Amino acid sequence: MNKKIIIPLALLAAIVFSIAVYFGVSKIWPGITPDAVASDGGRVIPFTIETFDGPSLKVETLTGKPLVINFWGSWCGPCRFEAPDLESAYRDFKRKVNFVGVAVQDSEQGARKFLRDFKITYPNGLDKDDSIMRAYQVYGVPMTVVYDKSGKMHYRHVGGITKSLLSEKLRELL
């Protein structure tokens, strides 16, 4: 191929990739829907994370209630847009649902500032070595995974999630 074709194609591929990451893959390619990704019936993958509040949290001990795990980064634009909705959903469901936030590819200082700026009160910690991100196959942030009370995956969403969508998915489990 000549350079006149390669450069525009590479530019187009970069633009499509950027849009997919920003808006979430499922909105760009309808065949890759959060429900389709969740249809394998995956289970909660055990991990321990030191929360920013101090104590370590073992996610596998959060049983008996549905669980929401949100992967985010302070550097992520869509994460900033969804943060108020996640906190609001947490406040509405905190007696019936466990929430955990996992900051990925971030600094402790940046993550703590993000939590302060958005007044996030549910437990959050930093994935210091990317091991949690790799275990959960996080390929874009934000990513939110919802599990039922037995630890079976119910829903997985890549891209910013709204309070109404998250609330709908949680009501399906309650």
Image (tube, rainbow, N blue to C red):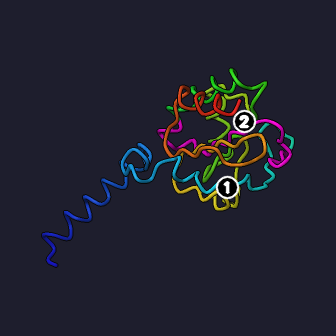
Residue farthest bottom in this picture: 1
Q: Earlier in the sequence, mark 1 or mark 2?
A: 1
Q: Is residue 24 left or right of residue 64?
A: left
Q: Is residue 159 left or right of residue 69?
A: left
Q: Quadrant of residue 67?
A: top right
**Mark 1 against mark 2, which lies toward the viewer?**
1
Q: Is residue 49 left or right of residue 89?
A: right
Closer to the camera, 165 or 16? 165
Residue 58 versus residue 161 in the image, above or below: below
Q: Secondary structure at mark 1?
A: loop
Residue on which the image places disc 1: 42
Residue 123 versus residue 92 in the image, above or below: below
Where residue 117 appears, as percent x and y from the top left, is: 61, 28
Is residue 25 among what the camera can see?
yes
Magenta residues span 56-79
Identify the residue at image location x=61%, y=49%: 106
Closer to the camera, 7 or 42? 42
Where residue 2 appears, as percent x and y from the top left, is: 14, 77
- The CA span between labels 1 and 2 is 18 Å
Would you say residue 167 sits in the magenta stretch? no
Q: Residues within 10 Å of mark 1 (few under 14, many from 20)?
A: some
Residue 33 versus residue 93 in the image, above or below: below
Q: For the residue marked with disc 2, what is the amino acid?
A: Phe
Q: For the residue marked with disc 1, what is the amino acid?
A: Gly
Closer to the camera, 55 or 40? 40
Numbered circles on residues, count: 2
Identify the residue at image location x=82%, y=42%: 62
Q: Are marks 1 and 2 in contact (CB under 8 Å)?
A: no
Res. 150 mark: none
Residue on which the image places disc 2: 99
Q: Where does the C terminus fall, quadrant-wise?
A: top right
